[in-house]
Image (spheres, rainbow, N blue to C red):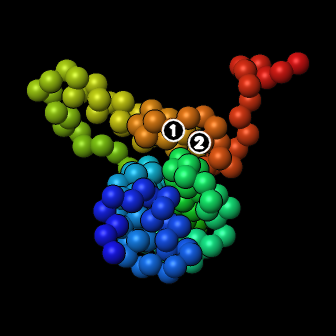
Amino acid sequence: MNFNNISNTALFRLFVEKGENEAISLFFQNQSNLFYRVALKYTINSADAVYVLQSAFIIIANKASQYKGLQTDEEKLLQSWCLSIVVHCALNKNRTESNRKRKESNHSNSKPFHEEENMATSLDNEAIYQKVQNAIVQLPEKFRIPIHLKYIEGFELDAIASILKLRVFSGICGSF
């Protein structure tokens, strides 16, 4: 069966309803860049992001039948559900890593992540971009991830809230 012209939601549905492994494989290929970028923003390390991605793919495949929006064709809803799993895996990875580092802290002098000292100075825009990227990386996770999802990935606030399991307020001061 040719799956190349089928939407991601239809691929996911084929996997859940008919057990089409090729469909879920293609779904993961289509979504891997987005999922990887989100995992990388949490882990700030390529190897850890790949580990998170692999863990998330396993969980998504195992819990696919639990996805409640299976009968809709809303791709953002499916992406949000999958991204919430990616985020959960990344948080677990960070928690595990944090615990390991805390245990090892008496034996090593590790320094926090920093960008290279010599930034590319050939273009002003590149230098500014690097400074912004470095500033974002230095933000606490609770600020870094929503900024990445909004301004890099282009998700709407309600989708970000769903992914991060947060509430969205309807105004700056909320409603009175």
Say what amino acid the circle numbered 2 marks.
Answer: Ile
- Residue 25 image offset from top left, x and y in percent: 38, 72
Report whether 41 appears left or right of 165.
Answer: left
Report whether 129 appears left or right of 157.
Answer: left
Q: In this view, does 81 lie above or below 145?
A: below
The CA distance from mark 1 to mark 2 is 6 Å
Q: Circle 1 sits on which residue?
A: 155
- The residue shown at (35%, 36%) is 133
- The residue shown at (35%, 55%) is 33
Q: Residue furthest front?
A: 1
Q: Residue furthest left?
A: 122
- Residue 64 image offset from top left, x and y in percent: 58, 71
Q: Circle 2 sits on which residue?
A: 160
* Other-residue count near label 2 (Cα within 10 Å), few / some / many at <14 / 14–19 / ≥20: many
Q: Do the residues labelled 1 and 2 touch (CB within 8 Å)?
A: yes
Q: Residue 86 carries which label?
A: none
Looking at the image, which is closer to me, 107 or 19?
A: 19
* Other-residue count near label 1 (Cα within 10 Å), few / some / many at <14 / 14–19 / ≥20: some
